Image: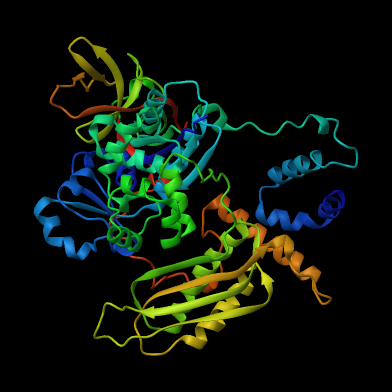
Protein backbone atom coordinates (compact mmCIF):
# COMPACT_ATOMS: atom_id res chain seq x y z
CA UNK A 1 0.00 0.00 0.00
CA UNK A 2 2.73 2.40 1.03
CA UNK A 3 4.83 1.82 -2.02
CA UNK A 4 1.97 2.57 -4.37
CA UNK A 5 1.51 5.98 -2.89
CA UNK A 6 5.23 6.72 -2.68
CA UNK A 7 5.60 6.23 -6.36
CA UNK A 8 2.28 7.98 -6.79
CA UNK A 9 3.70 11.14 -5.27
CA UNK A 10 6.24 11.38 -8.00
CA UNK A 11 4.26 10.25 -11.00
CA UNK A 12 0.71 11.16 -10.32
CA UNK A 13 1.07 14.92 -10.19
CA UNK A 14 0.51 15.23 -13.90
CA UNK A 15 -2.11 12.55 -13.96
CA UNK A 16 -4.12 13.85 -11.08
CA UNK A 17 -3.98 17.43 -12.22
CA UNK A 18 -5.54 16.35 -15.48
CA UNK A 19 -8.57 15.27 -13.53
CA UNK A 20 -8.43 18.12 -11.05
CA UNK A 21 -7.23 21.30 -12.73
CA UNK A 22 -7.95 23.04 -9.43
CA UNK A 23 -4.51 23.13 -7.84
CA UNK A 24 -5.67 23.90 -4.32
CA UNK A 25 -8.09 20.99 -4.35
CA UNK A 26 -5.35 18.71 -5.58
CA UNK A 27 -3.04 19.74 -2.77
CA UNK A 28 -5.74 19.11 -0.22
CA UNK A 29 -6.58 15.73 -1.66
CA UNK A 30 -2.97 14.71 -1.68
CA UNK A 31 -2.71 15.64 1.96
CA UNK A 32 -5.83 13.60 2.64
CA UNK A 33 -4.41 10.57 0.87
CA UNK A 34 -1.18 10.82 2.76
CA UNK A 35 -3.02 11.00 6.06
CA UNK A 36 -4.87 7.73 5.64
CA UNK A 37 -2.04 5.49 4.52
CA UNK A 38 -1.25 2.78 7.04
CA UNK A 39 2.52 3.00 7.22
CA UNK A 40 3.37 -0.32 8.76
CA UNK A 41 2.09 -0.05 12.34
CA UNK A 42 -1.03 -2.09 13.06
CA UNK A 43 -3.99 0.06 14.00
CA UNK A 44 -4.63 0.05 17.75
CA UNK A 45 -8.36 -0.10 16.91
CA UNK A 46 -8.11 -3.41 15.02
CA UNK A 47 -9.36 -5.43 17.96
CA UNK A 48 -12.41 -3.23 18.32
CA UNK A 49 -13.88 -3.59 14.84
CA UNK A 50 -17.59 -4.19 15.44
CA UNK A 51 -19.14 -4.47 11.98
CA UNK A 52 -21.24 -1.60 10.70
CA UNK A 53 -24.57 -0.03 11.53
CA UNK A 54 -27.44 -1.24 9.41
CA UNK A 55 -30.44 0.97 8.73
CA UNK A 56 -32.55 -2.17 8.24
CA UNK A 57 -31.93 -3.00 11.87
CA UNK A 58 -33.09 0.44 12.91
CA UNK A 59 -36.12 0.82 10.63
CA UNK A 60 -37.47 -2.74 10.35
CA UNK A 61 -38.86 -4.34 13.48
CA UNK A 62 -40.71 -7.21 11.78
CA UNK A 63 -39.12 -8.27 8.51
CA UNK A 64 -42.05 -10.44 7.42
CA UNK A 65 -44.64 -7.69 7.76
CA UNK A 66 -42.66 -4.62 6.67
CA UNK A 67 -43.19 -3.12 3.21
CA UNK A 68 -42.07 0.09 1.50
CA UNK A 69 -44.38 2.52 -0.28
CA UNK A 70 -43.91 5.72 -2.27
CA UNK A 71 -45.92 8.89 -1.52
CA UNK A 72 -47.66 10.88 -4.26
CA UNK A 73 -49.21 14.15 -3.09
CA UNK A 74 -48.85 16.87 -0.48
CA UNK A 75 -51.73 16.24 1.94
CA UNK A 76 -49.46 15.03 4.77
CA UNK A 77 -46.96 17.91 4.54
CA UNK A 78 -47.87 19.06 8.05
CA UNK A 79 -46.40 15.93 9.63
CA UNK A 80 -43.33 15.97 7.41
CA UNK A 81 -44.44 13.50 4.72
CA UNK A 82 -43.76 15.00 1.30
CA UNK A 83 -44.39 14.09 -2.33
CA UNK A 84 -41.98 11.32 -3.42
CA UNK A 85 -41.04 10.24 0.10
CA UNK A 86 -40.43 6.61 1.01
CA UNK A 87 -42.59 5.14 3.77
CA UNK A 88 -41.70 2.14 5.93
CA UNK A 89 -45.01 0.38 6.63
CA UNK A 90 -45.51 -2.40 9.18
CA UNK A 91 -48.66 -4.51 8.93
CA UNK A 92 -48.08 -6.20 12.30
CA UNK A 93 -48.62 -3.01 14.35
CA UNK A 94 -52.21 -2.44 15.58
CA UNK A 95 -53.78 0.69 14.09
CA UNK A 96 -54.56 2.69 17.21
CA UNK A 97 -56.24 6.10 17.44
CA UNK A 98 -54.00 8.83 16.08
CA UNK A 99 -51.39 6.81 14.20
CA UNK A 100 -50.48 7.44 10.58
CA UNK A 101 -51.69 4.56 8.41
CA UNK A 102 -51.89 3.30 4.87
CA UNK A 103 -55.63 2.91 4.33
CA UNK A 104 -57.46 1.41 1.39
CA UNK A 105 -60.46 3.56 0.43
CA UNK A 106 -62.53 2.36 -2.52
CA UNK A 107 -59.62 0.28 -3.83
CA UNK A 108 -56.96 2.99 -3.56
CA UNK A 109 -54.01 3.39 -1.16
CA UNK A 110 -53.89 6.59 0.86
CA UNK A 111 -51.66 7.75 3.72
CA UNK A 112 -53.52 9.64 6.48
CA UNK A 113 -53.85 9.93 10.23
CA UNK A 114 -56.45 7.47 11.55
CA UNK A 115 -58.95 8.59 14.19
CA UNK A 116 -61.41 6.21 15.80
CA UNK A 117 -64.46 8.46 16.29
CA UNK A 118 -67.87 7.49 17.70
CA UNK A 119 -69.44 8.09 14.27
CA UNK A 120 -66.89 5.87 12.54
CA UNK A 121 -63.27 5.92 11.35
CA UNK A 122 -61.98 9.30 10.20
CA UNK A 123 -58.97 9.92 7.94
CA UNK A 124 -57.25 13.22 8.71
CA UNK A 125 -54.75 14.92 6.40
CA UNK A 126 -52.07 17.32 7.60
CA UNK A 127 -52.73 20.17 5.17
CA UNK A 128 -55.23 23.07 5.39
CA UNK A 129 -56.72 22.31 1.94
CA UNK A 130 -57.74 18.73 2.83
CA UNK A 131 -60.79 18.33 5.13
CA UNK A 132 -61.36 15.32 7.41
CA UNK A 133 -62.83 12.32 5.65
CA UNK A 134 -65.46 10.36 7.58
CA UNK A 135 -65.73 6.81 6.23
CA UNK A 136 -69.33 5.92 5.42
CA UNK A 137 -70.49 2.39 6.19
CA UNK A 138 -71.13 1.66 2.49
CA UNK A 139 -67.58 2.61 1.52
CA UNK A 140 -64.88 0.01 0.92
CA UNK A 141 -62.42 0.67 3.72
CA UNK A 142 -59.59 -1.15 5.44
CA UNK A 143 -56.33 -0.32 7.17
CA UNK A 144 -53.46 -1.87 5.17
CA UNK A 145 -50.59 -1.09 7.53
CA UNK A 146 -49.16 1.39 10.00
CA UNK A 147 -46.52 3.88 8.86
CA UNK A 148 -43.46 3.51 11.10
CA UNK A 149 -40.89 5.73 9.39
CA UNK A 150 -40.64 8.26 6.60
CA UNK A 151 -37.43 8.36 4.59
CA UNK A 152 -37.14 11.89 3.25
CA UNK A 153 -34.33 13.23 1.07
CA UNK A 154 -33.10 16.50 2.55
CA UNK B 1 -48.64 -39.76 21.87
CA UNK B 2 -50.70 -38.87 18.85
CA UNK B 3 -48.91 -36.71 16.30
CA UNK B 4 -50.41 -33.40 15.26
CA UNK B 5 -49.24 -32.44 11.78
CA UNK B 6 -50.63 -29.24 10.30
CA UNK B 7 -50.76 -28.40 6.62
CA UNK B 8 -51.01 -24.66 6.06
CA UNK B 9 -52.09 -23.79 2.53
CA UNK B 10 -52.51 -20.29 1.07
CA UNK B 11 -55.86 -19.66 -0.59
CA UNK B 12 -55.68 -18.81 -4.32
CA UNK B 13 -52.10 -17.80 -3.61
CA UNK B 14 -51.10 -15.93 -6.78
CA UNK B 15 -54.39 -14.04 -6.93
CA UNK B 16 -54.11 -13.20 -3.22
CA UNK B 17 -50.59 -11.79 -3.82
CA UNK B 18 -51.89 -9.61 -6.65
CA UNK B 19 -54.76 -8.33 -4.54
CA UNK B 20 -52.47 -7.30 -1.69
CA UNK B 21 -51.00 -4.56 -3.87
CA UNK B 22 -54.01 -3.99 -6.11
CA UNK B 23 -56.89 -3.76 -3.65
CA UNK B 24 -59.21 -2.69 -6.45
CA UNK B 25 -59.18 -6.36 -7.57
CA UNK B 26 -60.99 -7.37 -4.37
CA UNK B 27 -64.40 -8.88 -5.08
CA UNK B 28 -63.77 -9.21 -8.82
CA UNK B 29 -63.16 -12.36 -10.87
CA UNK B 30 -59.38 -12.54 -11.32
CA UNK B 31 -57.15 -15.22 -12.85
CA UNK B 32 -53.37 -15.50 -13.09
CA UNK B 33 -51.93 -17.08 -16.25
CA UNK B 34 -48.89 -19.33 -16.65
CA UNK B 35 -45.71 -18.34 -18.50
CA UNK B 36 -46.40 -16.86 -21.92
CA UNK B 37 -49.95 -16.17 -20.75
CA UNK B 38 -50.87 -19.75 -21.62
CA UNK B 39 -53.16 -21.35 -19.04
CA UNK B 40 -55.02 -20.41 -15.88
CA UNK B 41 -52.84 -21.25 -12.86
CA UNK B 42 -54.69 -19.40 -10.08
CA UNK B 43 -58.30 -18.25 -9.72
CA UNK B 44 -60.12 -16.00 -7.32
CA UNK B 45 -63.26 -17.43 -5.71
CA UNK B 46 -65.34 -15.23 -8.02
CA UNK B 47 -63.64 -16.79 -11.06
CA UNK B 48 -64.19 -20.30 -9.67
CA UNK B 49 -67.86 -19.48 -9.17
CA UNK B 50 -68.08 -18.57 -12.87
CA UNK B 51 -66.95 -22.10 -13.66
CA UNK B 52 -63.43 -21.20 -14.80
CA UNK B 53 -61.40 -24.42 -14.51
CA UNK B 54 -57.77 -24.84 -13.52
CA UNK B 55 -55.17 -25.17 -16.32
CA UNK B 56 -57.62 -24.10 -19.01
CA UNK B 57 -55.91 -22.34 -21.96
CA UNK B 58 -56.67 -18.63 -21.79
CA UNK B 59 -57.59 -18.30 -25.47
CA UNK B 60 -60.54 -20.65 -24.90
CA UNK B 61 -61.91 -18.29 -22.26
CA UNK B 62 -62.01 -15.05 -24.28
CA UNK B 63 -65.81 -15.02 -24.61
CA UNK B 64 -66.58 -15.82 -20.96
CA UNK B 65 -63.94 -13.33 -19.89
CA UNK B 66 -65.43 -10.50 -21.92
CA UNK B 67 -68.95 -11.30 -20.77
CA UNK B 68 -68.11 -11.31 -17.05
CA UNK B 69 -65.21 -8.86 -16.99
CA UNK B 70 -62.66 -11.41 -15.84
CA UNK B 71 -59.28 -9.81 -15.19
CA UNK B 72 -56.30 -11.89 -16.37
CA UNK B 73 -52.80 -11.18 -15.07
CA UNK B 74 -49.44 -12.56 -16.19
CA UNK B 75 -47.62 -14.47 -13.49
CA UNK B 76 -45.26 -12.33 -11.40
CA UNK B 77 -43.09 -14.99 -9.74
CA UNK B 78 -40.75 -12.41 -8.22
CA UNK B 79 -43.61 -11.05 -6.14
CA UNK B 80 -45.02 -14.49 -5.28
CA UNK B 81 -41.62 -15.80 -4.16
CA UNK B 82 -41.05 -12.83 -1.84
CA UNK B 83 -44.47 -13.11 -0.22
CA UNK B 84 -44.07 -16.89 0.04
CA UNK B 85 -40.78 -16.43 1.92
CA UNK B 86 -42.53 -14.08 4.34
CA UNK B 87 -45.35 -16.58 4.96
CA UNK B 88 -42.90 -19.46 5.51
CA UNK B 89 -40.73 -17.41 7.84
CA UNK B 90 -43.77 -16.46 9.96
CA UNK B 91 -44.93 -20.07 10.04
CA UNK B 92 -41.55 -21.24 11.32
CA UNK B 93 -42.24 -19.21 14.45
CA UNK B 94 -45.23 -21.40 15.28
CA UNK B 95 -43.41 -24.73 15.31
CA UNK B 96 -39.91 -26.08 15.76
CA UNK B 97 -40.33 -28.42 12.80
CA UNK B 98 -41.33 -27.25 9.33
CA UNK B 99 -41.36 -28.72 5.84
CA UNK B 100 -41.88 -26.21 3.04
CA UNK B 101 -43.79 -28.32 0.57
CA UNK B 102 -44.39 -25.84 -2.23
CA UNK B 103 -44.55 -22.11 -2.89
CA UNK B 104 -47.89 -21.90 -1.07
CA UNK B 105 -47.97 -24.94 1.25
CA UNK B 106 -46.05 -25.93 4.36
CA UNK B 107 -46.30 -28.75 6.88
CA UNK B 108 -45.56 -27.87 10.50
CA UNK B 109 -45.41 -30.24 13.44
CA UNK B 110 -47.70 -29.12 16.27
CA UNK B 111 -47.31 -32.27 18.40
CA UNK B 112 -46.96 -31.48 22.08
CA UNK B 113 -47.91 -27.83 21.75
CA UNK B 114 -49.83 -27.10 24.96
CA UNK B 115 -52.79 -25.31 23.42
CA UNK B 116 -56.14 -26.03 21.88
CA UNK B 117 -54.94 -26.67 18.33
CA UNK B 118 -58.05 -25.27 16.66
CA UNK B 119 -57.41 -21.98 18.49
CA UNK B 120 -53.74 -22.24 17.60
CA UNK B 121 -54.67 -22.74 13.94
CA UNK B 122 -56.84 -19.63 14.08
CA UNK B 123 -53.91 -17.70 15.60
CA UNK B 124 -51.69 -18.82 12.72
CA UNK B 125 -54.35 -17.76 10.24
CA UNK B 126 -54.82 -14.33 11.82
CA UNK B 127 -51.05 -13.71 12.03
CA UNK B 128 -50.44 -14.50 8.36
CA UNK B 129 -53.50 -12.56 7.25
CA UNK B 130 -52.47 -9.50 9.22
CA UNK B 131 -48.69 -9.56 8.68
CA UNK B 132 -48.46 -10.62 5.03
CA UNK B 133 -52.07 -10.10 3.94
CA UNK B 134 -52.49 -13.64 2.60
CA UNK B 135 -55.51 -15.81 3.61
CA UNK B 136 -54.64 -19.40 4.54
CA UNK B 137 -56.41 -22.60 5.61
CA UNK B 138 -55.08 -24.98 8.24
CA UNK B 139 -55.67 -28.74 8.36
CA UNK B 140 -54.49 -30.70 11.40
CA UNK B 141 -54.30 -34.51 11.73
CA UNK B 142 -52.17 -37.42 12.84
CA UNK B 143 -50.40 -37.91 9.50
CA UNK B 144 -49.38 -35.82 6.51
CA UNK B 145 -51.89 -37.53 4.22
CA UNK B 146 -54.73 -36.86 6.68
CA UNK B 147 -53.52 -33.28 7.26
CA UNK B 148 -53.88 -32.67 3.51
CA UNK B 149 -57.46 -33.92 3.66
CA UNK B 150 -58.18 -31.87 6.79
CA UNK B 151 -56.99 -28.85 4.85
CA UNK B 152 -59.31 -29.79 1.99
CA UNK B 153 -62.24 -29.86 4.43
CA UNK B 154 -61.16 -26.56 6.03
CA UNK B 155 -61.18 -24.97 2.58
CA UNK B 156 -64.46 -26.40 1.28
CA UNK B 157 -66.70 -26.35 4.36
CA UNK B 158 -67.45 -22.90 5.79
CA UNK B 159 -68.55 -24.55 9.06
CA UNK B 160 -64.89 -24.99 10.07
CA UNK B 161 -63.87 -21.34 9.56
CA UNK B 162 -60.74 -22.37 7.62
CA UNK B 163 -59.25 -24.50 10.43
CA UNK B 164 -60.06 -28.20 10.68
CA UNK B 165 -58.56 -30.54 13.28
CA UNK B 166 -59.26 -34.24 12.59
CA UNK B 167 -57.61 -35.22 15.89
CA UNK B 168 -60.40 -33.79 18.02
CA UNK B 169 -63.11 -35.72 16.20
CA UNK B 170 -64.46 -39.13 17.10
CA UNK B 171 -63.87 -41.94 14.60
CA UNK B 172 -67.52 -41.82 13.60
CA UNK B 173 -67.45 -38.07 12.92
CA UNK B 174 -64.24 -38.35 10.94
CA UNK B 175 -65.53 -41.27 8.88
CA UNK B 176 -68.61 -39.32 7.82
CA UNK B 177 -66.31 -36.55 6.53
CA UNK B 178 -63.99 -39.01 4.76
CA UNK B 179 -66.91 -40.78 3.14
CA UNK B 180 -67.89 -37.51 1.45
CA UNK B 181 -64.48 -37.00 -0.20
CA UNK B 182 -63.62 -38.73 -3.47
CA UNK B 183 -60.63 -41.05 -3.41
CA UNK B 184 -58.90 -39.00 -6.12
CA UNK B 185 -58.49 -36.10 -3.68
CA UNK B 186 -55.97 -38.08 -1.63
CA UNK B 187 -52.40 -36.86 -1.80
CA UNK B 188 -50.45 -39.06 -4.18
CA UNK B 189 -53.43 -40.87 -5.71
CA UNK B 190 -53.30 -40.06 -9.41
CA UNK B 191 -55.89 -40.33 -12.16
CA UNK B 192 -54.89 -43.84 -13.17
CA UNK B 193 -54.97 -45.26 -9.66
CA UNK B 194 -58.32 -43.55 -9.07
CA UNK B 195 -59.84 -45.28 -12.09
CA UNK B 196 -58.48 -48.67 -11.00
CA UNK B 197 -59.57 -48.18 -7.39
CA UNK B 198 -63.08 -47.42 -8.66
CA UNK B 199 -63.25 -50.75 -10.49
CA UNK B 200 -62.41 -52.39 -7.16
CA UNK B 201 -65.35 -50.58 -5.54
CA UNK B 202 -63.18 -48.01 -3.75
CA UNK B 203 -64.79 -44.65 -4.40
CA UNK B 204 -64.29 -42.52 -1.31
CA UNK B 205 -61.46 -41.81 1.08
CA UNK B 206 -63.26 -43.91 3.68
CA UNK B 207 -63.35 -46.88 1.30
CA UNK B 208 -59.57 -46.73 0.92
CA UNK B 209 -59.09 -46.27 4.67
CA UNK B 210 -60.96 -49.53 5.24
CA UNK B 211 -59.34 -51.41 2.35
CA UNK B 212 -57.03 -54.32 3.12
CA UNK B 213 -53.43 -53.03 3.14
CA UNK B 214 -52.23 -56.41 1.86
CA UNK B 215 -54.58 -56.30 -1.09
CA UNK B 216 -53.63 -52.69 -1.94
CA UNK B 217 -49.97 -53.61 -1.80
CA UNK B 218 -50.43 -56.52 -4.17
CA UNK B 219 -52.66 -54.63 -6.59
CA UNK B 220 -50.76 -51.32 -6.51
CA UNK B 221 -47.59 -50.60 -4.59
CA UNK B 222 -45.95 -50.20 -1.20
CA UNK B 223 -46.50 -46.48 -1.61
CA UNK B 224 -50.28 -46.81 -1.71
CA UNK B 225 -50.17 -49.30 1.14
CA UNK B 226 -48.43 -46.61 3.15
CA UNK B 227 -51.20 -44.18 2.19
CA UNK B 228 -53.74 -46.61 3.68
CA UNK B 229 -51.76 -46.65 6.93
CA UNK B 230 -51.58 -42.86 6.92
CA UNK B 231 -55.35 -42.66 6.44
CA UNK B 232 -55.70 -44.81 9.55
CA UNK B 233 -53.70 -42.28 11.54
CA UNK B 234 -50.35 -44.08 11.41
CA UNK B 235 -47.76 -41.52 10.33
CA UNK B 236 -45.38 -43.11 7.81
CA UNK B 237 -44.07 -39.93 6.18
CA UNK B 238 -41.76 -37.72 8.20
CA UNK B 239 -41.43 -33.97 7.78
CA UNK B 240 -38.52 -33.35 5.47
CA UNK B 241 -36.86 -30.19 6.64
CA UNK B 242 -34.09 -30.39 4.09
CA UNK B 243 -34.94 -31.22 0.50
CA UNK B 244 -32.42 -33.76 -0.78
CA UNK B 245 -30.14 -32.47 -3.57
CA UNK B 246 -31.79 -32.96 -6.92
CA UNK B 247 -30.57 -35.68 -9.24
CA UNK B 248 -31.63 -33.78 -12.32
CA UNK B 249 -31.95 -30.07 -12.93
CA UNK B 250 -34.24 -28.96 -15.71
CA UNK B 251 -34.68 -25.50 -17.14
CA UNK B 252 -37.05 -25.15 -20.05
CA UNK B 253 -39.55 -22.64 -21.30
CA UNK B 254 -41.74 -21.91 -24.28
CA UNK B 255 -40.87 -18.92 -26.42
CA UNK B 256 -43.00 -15.78 -26.60
CA UNK B 257 -43.06 -16.21 -30.38
CA UNK B 258 -41.70 -19.07 -32.51
CA UNK B 259 -37.95 -19.08 -33.16
CA UNK B 260 -36.33 -20.45 -36.33
CA UNK B 261 -32.76 -19.17 -36.43
CA UNK B 262 -29.85 -21.02 -34.83
CA UNK B 263 -28.37 -17.88 -33.19
CA UNK B 264 -31.69 -17.10 -31.43
CA UNK B 265 -32.07 -20.70 -30.26
CA UNK B 266 -28.46 -20.60 -29.09
CA UNK B 267 -29.17 -17.54 -26.94
CA UNK B 268 -32.09 -19.29 -25.27
CA UNK B 269 -30.05 -22.46 -24.69
CA UNK B 270 -27.24 -20.41 -23.11
CA UNK B 271 -29.69 -18.52 -20.88
CA UNK B 272 -31.34 -21.73 -19.65
CA UNK B 273 -28.00 -23.49 -19.18
CA UNK B 274 -26.73 -20.54 -17.14
CA UNK B 275 -29.83 -20.72 -14.93
CA UNK B 276 -29.48 -24.49 -14.49
CA UNK B 277 -25.79 -24.12 -13.65
CA UNK B 278 -26.72 -21.58 -10.98
CA UNK B 279 -29.15 -24.06 -9.40
CA UNK B 280 -26.44 -26.75 -9.62
CA UNK B 281 -23.93 -24.60 -7.71
CA UNK B 282 -26.64 -23.65 -5.20
CA UNK B 283 -26.81 -27.27 -4.11
CA UNK B 284 -23.00 -27.67 -4.26
CA UNK B 285 -23.06 -30.29 -7.00
CA UNK B 286 -21.39 -30.92 -10.32
CA UNK B 287 -22.90 -32.47 -13.46
CA UNK B 288 -21.43 -35.09 -15.74
CA UNK B 289 -23.83 -34.63 -18.63
CA UNK B 290 -26.20 -32.19 -20.24
CA UNK B 291 -29.22 -32.93 -22.38
CA UNK B 292 -30.68 -30.42 -24.83
CA UNK B 293 -34.01 -30.65 -26.57
CA UNK B 294 -35.96 -28.53 -29.03
CA UNK B 295 -39.44 -28.88 -30.38
CA UNK B 296 -41.94 -27.15 -32.64
CA UNK B 297 -45.52 -26.46 -31.58
CA UNK B 298 -47.34 -29.84 -31.62
CA UNK B 299 -50.74 -28.08 -31.56
CA UNK B 300 -50.11 -26.48 -34.95
CA UNK B 301 -51.10 -29.53 -36.92
CA UNK B 302 -50.44 -28.04 -40.35
CA UNK B 303 -46.97 -26.71 -39.59
CA UNK B 304 -43.90 -28.91 -40.23
CA UNK B 305 -42.96 -30.71 -37.02
CA UNK B 306 -39.57 -31.51 -35.59
CA UNK B 307 -38.48 -32.49 -32.13
CA UNK B 308 -35.25 -33.98 -30.99
CA UNK B 309 -33.01 -34.21 -27.99
CA UNK B 310 -29.40 -35.11 -27.44
CA UNK B 311 -27.29 -35.99 -24.42
CA UNK B 312 -23.77 -34.62 -24.30
CA UNK B 313 -21.30 -36.17 -21.88
CA UNK B 314 -18.90 -33.65 -20.37
CA UNK B 315 -15.15 -34.39 -20.48
CA UNK B 316 -15.22 -34.11 -16.68
CA UNK B 317 -18.03 -33.30 -14.22
CA UNK B 318 -18.29 -29.55 -13.77
CA UNK B 319 -20.37 -26.67 -12.43
CA UNK B 320 -18.74 -24.08 -14.68
CA UNK B 321 -21.34 -22.17 -16.71
CA UNK B 322 -18.89 -21.72 -19.58
CA UNK B 323 -18.10 -25.42 -20.00
CA UNK B 324 -21.76 -26.38 -19.70
CA UNK B 325 -22.77 -23.77 -22.30
CA UNK B 326 -20.04 -24.94 -24.64
CA UNK B 327 -21.39 -28.50 -24.45
CA UNK B 328 -25.00 -27.34 -24.76
CA UNK B 329 -24.27 -25.34 -27.92
CA UNK B 330 -22.41 -28.20 -29.57
CA UNK B 331 -25.44 -30.39 -28.84
CA UNK B 332 -27.84 -27.81 -30.23
CA UNK B 333 -25.86 -27.56 -33.48
CA UNK B 334 -26.22 -31.34 -33.91
CA UNK B 335 -30.00 -31.45 -33.54
CA UNK B 336 -31.00 -28.12 -35.10
CA UNK B 337 -32.66 -28.22 -38.50
CA UNK B 338 -33.21 -25.21 -40.67
CA UNK B 339 -36.73 -24.23 -41.66
CA UNK B 340 -38.74 -25.13 -38.56
CA UNK B 341 -40.58 -22.77 -36.22
CA UNK B 342 -39.41 -23.94 -32.82
CA UNK B 343 -41.64 -23.25 -29.85
CA UNK B 344 -39.71 -24.62 -26.92
CA UNK B 345 -36.23 -25.54 -25.86
CA UNK B 346 -34.87 -26.93 -22.64
CA UNK B 347 -31.72 -28.19 -20.98
CA UNK B 348 -31.34 -30.87 -18.36
CA UNK B 349 -28.26 -31.48 -16.22
CA UNK B 350 -27.74 -35.16 -15.38
CA UNK B 351 -25.22 -37.44 -13.68
CA UNK B 352 -25.20 -35.02 -10.76
CA UNK B 353 -22.84 -35.72 -7.87
CA UNK B 354 -21.76 -33.66 -4.85
CA UNK B 355 -18.88 -31.32 -5.71
CA UNK B 356 -16.87 -32.92 -2.92
CA UNK B 357 -16.98 -36.26 -4.76
CA UNK B 358 -15.28 -34.87 -7.87
CA UNK B 359 -13.16 -37.66 -9.32
CA UNK B 360 -9.47 -36.82 -9.34
CA UNK B 361 -7.20 -37.75 -12.20
CA UNK B 362 -3.50 -37.50 -12.75
CA UNK B 363 -3.95 -34.80 -15.35
CA UNK B 364 -6.26 -32.47 -13.43
CA UNK B 365 -5.45 -28.83 -14.03
CA UNK B 366 -5.79 -27.73 -10.40
CA UNK B 367 -4.99 -24.09 -11.15
CA UNK B 368 -7.72 -23.90 -13.79
CA UNK B 369 -10.23 -25.53 -11.44
CA UNK B 370 -9.49 -22.98 -8.74
CA UNK B 371 -9.82 -20.17 -11.23
CA UNK B 372 -13.13 -21.53 -12.46
CA UNK B 373 -14.57 -21.92 -8.99
CA UNK B 374 -13.45 -18.40 -8.02
CA UNK B 375 -15.09 -16.97 -11.13
CA UNK B 376 -18.36 -18.85 -10.60
CA UNK B 377 -18.49 -17.87 -6.92
CA UNK B 378 -18.03 -14.21 -7.88
CA UNK B 379 -20.68 -14.48 -10.61
CA UNK B 380 -23.24 -15.97 -8.21
CA UNK B 381 -22.34 -13.47 -5.51
CA UNK B 382 -22.89 -10.48 -7.80
CA UNK B 383 -26.17 -11.86 -9.15
CA UNK B 384 -27.43 -12.61 -5.67
CA UNK B 385 -26.63 -9.11 -4.48
CA UNK B 386 -27.48 -7.02 -7.51
CA UNK B 387 -30.35 -9.07 -8.89
CA UNK B 388 -30.48 -12.17 -11.03
CA UNK B 389 -29.04 -11.71 -14.53
CA UNK B 390 -26.94 -8.65 -13.62
CA UNK B 391 -23.79 -10.42 -14.80
CA UNK B 392 -24.22 -12.96 -17.57
CA UNK B 393 -22.63 -14.47 -20.63
CA UNK B 394 -22.90 -12.24 -23.67
CA UNK B 395 -24.07 -15.32 -25.57
CA UNK B 396 -27.50 -14.95 -23.94
CA UNK B 397 -27.94 -11.92 -26.13
CA UNK B 398 -29.06 -8.44 -25.23
CA UNK B 399 -32.22 -8.14 -27.30
CA UNK B 400 -34.04 -11.39 -26.61
CA UNK B 401 -36.25 -12.24 -29.56
CA UNK B 402 -37.33 -15.40 -27.78
CA UNK B 403 -38.25 -13.92 -24.40
CA UNK B 404 -41.48 -14.90 -22.67
CA UNK B 405 -44.71 -13.11 -23.36
CA UNK B 406 -46.02 -11.41 -20.26
CA UNK B 407 -48.70 -9.05 -21.44
CA UNK B 408 -50.22 -7.97 -18.16
CA UNK B 409 -47.66 -8.36 -15.40
CA UNK B 410 -47.99 -6.38 -12.19
CA UNK B 411 -45.10 -4.49 -10.62
CA UNK B 412 -42.42 -6.12 -8.47
CA UNK B 413 -43.70 -4.21 -5.45
CA UNK B 414 -41.40 -5.78 -2.87
CA UNK B 415 -38.09 -6.28 -4.67
CA UNK B 416 -37.55 -3.26 -6.97
CA UNK B 417 -37.13 0.31 -5.71
CA UNK B 418 -38.60 1.73 -8.91
CA UNK B 419 -41.73 -0.42 -8.71
CA UNK B 420 -42.99 0.28 -5.19
CA UNK B 421 -46.71 0.70 -4.58
CA UNK B 422 -47.82 4.33 -4.51
CA UNK B 423 -50.13 5.85 -1.89
CA UNK B 424 -52.03 9.14 -2.15
CA UNK B 425 -50.53 11.68 0.23
Tally of numbered tags = 0
**In the rendered image, the vertical position of residue B163 relative to residue A136, given as above or below:** below
As rendered, which of B3 and B207 lies closer to the eye? B207
**In the rendered image, the vertical position of residue B400 relative to residue A58, given as above or below:** below
As rendered, which of A16 and B375 lies closer to the eye? B375
As rendered, which of B251 and B410 lies closer to the eye? B251
Q: Quadrant of residue B218?
A: bottom left
Answer yes or no: is residue B166 visible. yes
Answer yes or no: is residue B414 visible. no
User: Relative to residue B244, is residue B19 drawn left or right?
Assistant: left
What residue sits 82% from the left and 77% below the top?
B363
What residue sits 79% from the left and 73% below the top?
B365
Outermost residue, bottom direction?
B338
Q: Quadrant of residue A77?
A: top left
As rendered, which of B277 and B56 lies closer to the eye? B56
What residue sits 35% from the left and 86% below the top?
B340
Amino acid sequence: MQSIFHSGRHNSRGLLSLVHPNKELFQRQRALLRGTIPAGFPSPADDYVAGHLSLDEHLIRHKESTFFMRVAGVSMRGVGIYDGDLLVVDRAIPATHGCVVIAVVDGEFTVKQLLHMPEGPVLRAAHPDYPDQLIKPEQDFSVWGVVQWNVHKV
Amino acid sequence: MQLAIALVDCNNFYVSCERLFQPQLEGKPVVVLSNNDGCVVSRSQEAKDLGIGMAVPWYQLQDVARKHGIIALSSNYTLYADLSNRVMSLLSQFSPDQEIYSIDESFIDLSGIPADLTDYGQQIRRAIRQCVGIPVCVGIAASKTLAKLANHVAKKQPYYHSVCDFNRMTDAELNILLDAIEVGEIWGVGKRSTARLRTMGIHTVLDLKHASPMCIRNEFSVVLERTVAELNGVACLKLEDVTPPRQQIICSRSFGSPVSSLPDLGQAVIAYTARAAEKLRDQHSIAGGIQIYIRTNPHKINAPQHQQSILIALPEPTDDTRQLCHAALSGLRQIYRNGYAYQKTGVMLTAIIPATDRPRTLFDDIAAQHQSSALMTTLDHINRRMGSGTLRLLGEGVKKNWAMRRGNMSKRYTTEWRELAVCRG
